[in-house]
Image (cartoon, rainbow, N blue to C red):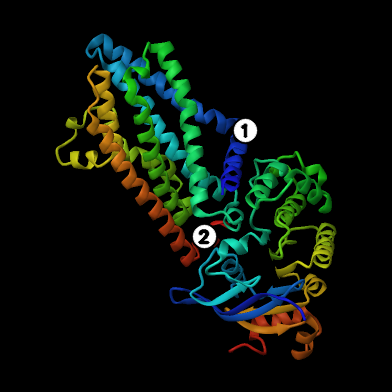
Amino acid sequence: MISRVFALLLRYLYLYRRSLARSMEVFFWPVMDLLVWGFLTTYLQTVAAPAAVSYLLGAMILWDVLYRCQQAITLAFTEDIWTRNILNVFVTPVRTSELLLATSLLGVLKSLAPLVLLMTLAWAFYSFSLFAVGASLGPFLVCLLLFGWAVGMFTAALILRFGQAAEALVWGVPFLIQPVSATFYPVDVLPAWVRPLALALPSTHVFEGMRQALRGEAVEPRWLITAFGLDIVYLGAGAAFFAWMLRRVREKGYLGRLGME
Amino acid sequence: MAERVLEVAGLTKRFGAVTAVDGVSFEADRGEILGLLGPNGAGKTTTLQMLLGLTTPTAGSARILGLDLARQRHAILQRVNFSSAYVNLPYNLTAYENLNVFARLYGVRRPAEKIRALLELFEIPEAHDRVTGALSTGQQTRLNLCKAFLNDPEVLFLDEPTASLDPDIADKVRTTLLRLQRERGVTMIYTSHNMPEVERLCDRVIFLSRGRVAAFGTAQELRQKMDRGSLDEVFITIAREGGPGSAR
């Protein structure tokens, strides 16, 4: 099993090594986001909101972890559809669990590499250190990676079902989650009827906890406990949905067609 | 007595109201090349996809290498392989990188040596460090075949492997496939629209028409049975009228 997971991971890493555009993309957009948000919040700090830099930059950097992780998983499947290689993969003895594990590990790599760069740049340009979040930073990152895996599995399942027609989901799904996750503002800002939905997402609890930490307060354990609990639920549901969709695309003959689109 | 490696019984696939494959049954022995022929839409691709575990049959069963496809798919996939003119390897990886990934997926020992040997066998050693997308169509097709032989498959599913090749390269590919069949006893399920190629390669052929087996036998038997001078004529007759075994 490990050798097959390694083989799949190798295939994705070859792709990034081989393509300068793809490698740059991993770092380019996060850095551009950081610069725009950073300068904006620096300006806001001068006019009204002294804590804006830490809240917004912290949220932006942590959000990128979730986004990159989800994107790595879904792009791995989309790449195989683009290059008409997906049938080659599905006629090997690789198991669904191995495929998901390999793409999830890729998600971790693709999230953590820009994270290091963003943290360094945030410190260099805006004197903001994500370590200000304190001891909760590690668990927060893990919560976001787990949620990124879950969202990635849901999206990848839809891509298997709808093929290239669903490509927009690779980039679009995280932005359905972002406004509800209270990423850049407290959950209280959301309309009352949206709040239960927000609190049903693990990311909301991470961002609430992050803001609490950046205010210099002790992070309430409930944020982390709820986030982890929800992560487990979403991961289970994501894996089950992916497996169900794979069975369905086999039954409907979509998998065969997918490789020859 | 020949060893039976493929037993297909009543294989059926329905997509809603459409029956793409309707109770297809056939067998293949070790080392046999079996042609799976028929006009477009006859059910060849759906049959192949069911045998590769890509599409779940609505009814019927298949045993490959003595294993039940429905319950032992992964064990079967370890011992079979597939190549199609319509399925590519990622164009942005080198030939070596592509083959290395698949070698590891199949658990091939000493993959670097195996890859070099296969590239030599299919006469494309120069492709080793070249990006797949920069290879000619003929080189890419042969690279696909290298992928298909990485795990020394006992059963190989080939979907129009020589489509889009020039006659010279197509002939080289056919010669290599025949050599591998003889030397290694590989069973091949072969789809093609090139009837002279089928006559040269295939020990027996199955003609599908509207999802059913319309005719089954050696090329010579079918020519005689249908009183036609060539397999091309047999094909045209079956495509237009159905075969001797057809329900029509």
Which disc is residue A255 wearing? 2
Q: Is residue B110 left or right of residue A216?
A: right
State which tag comes first along the sequence, 1 or 2: 1
The chain to which mark 1 is attached is: A
* Disc 2 residue type (three-letter): Leu
Q: Is residue A21 left or right of residue A31?
A: right
What is the CA distance from the residue labelled 1 to the residue labelled 2? 28 Å
Q: On the image, which quarter does residue A93 sit in?
A: bottom right
Above or below, B108 against B194 in this view is above
Q: Which residue is mark 1?
A: A17
Element carrying mark 1? helix
One can see residue A51 in this view: yes
Q: Mark 2 packing: few (<14 Cα in 10 Å), some, or many (20+)?
A: many
Residue beneath the point at 79% across and 70% down = B197
Above or below, B187 against B9 in this view is above
Above or below, B223 against A77 in this view is below
